[in-house]
Amino acid sequence: MLGCLVFALTRWKKYPKVAMMVALGLGLLIIHLIIFVFVYDLVPPLFLKDTTSQNYEEITRIRRIVFLVVGLIYNTTAIVGYGILVAGIFMQRNPPPQPNSVAAGLNI
């Protein structure tokens, strides 16, 4: 991702809007990755620290719910970065020229 960010920044003068959107999307994804490294390390122990007195099924249920919720939050926040990145990639594209009927060989 860092290589793509550097590449987008080198294209800033030629394509300023596209480079800005791509750099913003990649920057958000990099920040997202850094934040969720800590979230996945720190949040589950908060909910699972006092599970020694509970039975195995209860611990398993709590663990599944915690990782399900953290995973849903991870994926929904990643959508923002990927959405901006895809919008930047596809912005300012010209549609391909449409062939007319004579050039295409259709003499009707």
Image: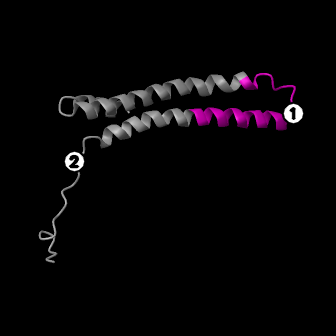
Element class at badge 1: loop
Foreground of the two, 76 or 42: 76
Disc 2 designates what residue? 94
Element class at badge 2: loop
In the current view of this chain or complex, which residue is farthest to the front? 108
Of circles 2 and 1, which is in front?
A: 2
Residue type at numbered disc 2: Asn
User: Badge 2, how many Cα within 10 Å: few under 14, some, many 20+?
Assistant: few
Residue at 44%, 31% in the rendered image: 29
Q: Is residue 77 magenta?
A: no
Disc 1 designates what residue? 55
Q: Quadrant of the C terminus?
A: bottom left
Please state the horizontal and vertical placement of residue 61, each as a whole percent of the image. Answer: 78, 37
Q: Quadrant of the N terminus?
A: top left
Please state the horizontal and vertical placement of residue 67, each as a whole percent of the image. Answer: 66, 34
Residue type at numbered disc 1: Asn
Q: Magenta part of the protein: which range?
A: 47-73
Sequence-earlier tag: 2 or 1: 1
Left or right side of 3 for 51? right
